[in-house]
Image (cartoon, rainbow, N blue to C red):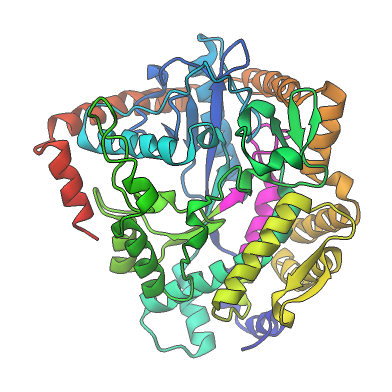
Amino acid sequence: MATLLETLKDIEQNPAFISSLATQFRGIERESLRTAEDHLIAQTPHPKSLGSALSHSQITTDFSEAQLEFITQVHPRIDTCLYDLYKIHQFAYMGIHNQNEVLWAGSMPPELPDNRPIPIAQFGTSNVAKMKSTYREGLKIRYNDKMQTISGIHYNFSLSDKFFVHYQKYLGNTDSAMEFKTEQYFGLIRNFQRVAPLFVYLFGATPAFDESFLPKDHYLHSDVLKLNHTCYLPYATSLRMSDIGYTSEAQKGLYVCYNHLDNYIDSLRLAIKEPYSRYEALGLLNSQGNPHQLNTSLLQIENEFYSPIRPKRVTASGEAPVNALARAGVEYVEVRCVDIDPFKPMGLDEETLIFLDLLLLACVLMDSPDFSLETCQMTQDNLQRIIHYGRQPDLTMRDARDNGLEKPFKSLAMELIDMLEPLAQFLDKLQAKSPYQDNLKQQRQKIDNPELTPSAKTIDALREYGDYTTFIHKKNAQWHAYFSQSTLSEISRKAFEDAAVNSLVQQSIIEKNDTVDFTHYLENYYSQY
């Protein structure tokens, strides 16, 4: 297969292909905890003025009732996507203002006292609402509720159908359009897993957390440094992605294959169907006789599988995600390793999105050999090294392109930036300015000088403010003022208010239309597998 540079040279001869390559679609899902005046997680219900967490398309909740999730629409332009997210933030701040609450500006949560409950998200009385809350109860007893209070950002990315038509013709592929598109997205996923350590180094922003977050028996107690009530690793980049966060010990033995759609679906179906002894011992019901997990398998549903990136398709009502993929193939990919950057009002900005778009597009156009089990383990090991020691001057990493040979991370990172440069030049020819090349200059500076990374800046801020909670509280106040200094237009405010009211009506309709009890509802749902 041609190299990325060779592919770009060939594409230059086809104006229609060039145009299709420049069209990408993106959406953002940003989570954030509501915190009260005491800087702890809010105990208040999801504000009714924001609508129904069950049925609102743009404002919902994640694990906790206090954990807001903002969802943009799909946008062909970065600036309109970010503006969409900005308006959601504005409206949300209006909704929590009367409760004297603010949004927590970091991925890692505030202090989590043992005597203060973490309210699990509630979605109403319908079967689908009960399933959502029971799933979260299952997460609590399987992993603990403190871990679930971590917030992050998901980035949804896709390319146009015209691109895949041109690319398939260029490659001389004769598969069906759906099969080709799906295989290309799986190639993107494999390549992203290979290069994810670079992204996490450049944009990771969770090198520290409040000491109340770490379980008393966790091995990291012997490794972390302490600063007042804060735990940190001096060279860490994204502890949110470590085994104190979204890497599950129970799932370490789960090998999900990203080589082909059938392999991927079979892996997840097995994990959802096969009982897992540790979770069997917990039982389906709590001591009060209420459901506290959906099943006793390794995974309750697909969302429980933690991965830096995964294939996605919009599902029909009640449809299992793997069945949607089997029915119509991959529609987009969801990047899940984006930390909330506390130095940015929305947790990310144009810099993050430009680099992600460039990286993901390169991952489509590059050769992407199938993963062996050894390759899979190598990529996971590389990512964990970056997570814990990413800014360590002598850090090495295994080069998957060179038989797993250990090489300095800095030289490998620069090689990847060099590889992206022709694509950046190519895309900038279609722009009035040079956003992609300018972005790569910023990333080179971070590789040359680790102190410019968000994780290093966070460590500096800890020392300035004394601890993690005080630092993030200062950013909370700053971003509250930022979003409060301007008001939504009358048209936007009215649209959000109408959407909130309509979502509450929709929730009521869903509740009235239930025709079976919860036990049979779950049986019907799992029969899909």
Judge from the rendering whether residue 136 lies leftward or rightward of residue 247; answer left or right: left
In this view of the protein, which residue sits in the foreground, 386 or 330? 386
In this view of the protein, which residue sits in the foreground, 235 or 357? 235
The part of the image, by quadrant, that contains residue 321 is bottom left
Residue at 54% x, 86% y is 170
Q: Can you say whether 130 is above or below 41 in the image?
A: below
Q: Is residue 337 magenta?
A: yes
In this view of the protein, which residue sits in the foreground, 99 or 383? 383
Q: Is residue 325 magenta?
A: no
Measuring from the top left, give residue 59's x and y in whole percent: 44, 32
Q: Quadrant of the C terminus?
A: bottom left
Measuring from the top left, give residue 67's x and y in whole percent: 49, 29
Residue at 28% x, 27% y is 287
Q: Is residue 329 visible?
A: no
Judge from the rendering whether residue 5 lies leftward or rightward of residue 265; answer left or right: right
Judge from the rendering whether residue 63 lies leftward or rightward of residue 224; answer left or right: left
Residue farthest to the left?
515
Q: Is residue 290 visible?
A: yes
Judge from the rendering whether residue 214 lies leftward or rightward of residue 518; answer left or right: right
- Count the labels in the image: 0
Which span is picked out in magenta? 336-360
Residue at 37% x, 18% y is 48
Q: Quadrant of the N terminus?
A: bottom right
Measuring from the top left, give residue 119's x and y in whole percent: 43, 23
The part of the image, by quadrant, that contains residue 268 is bottom left
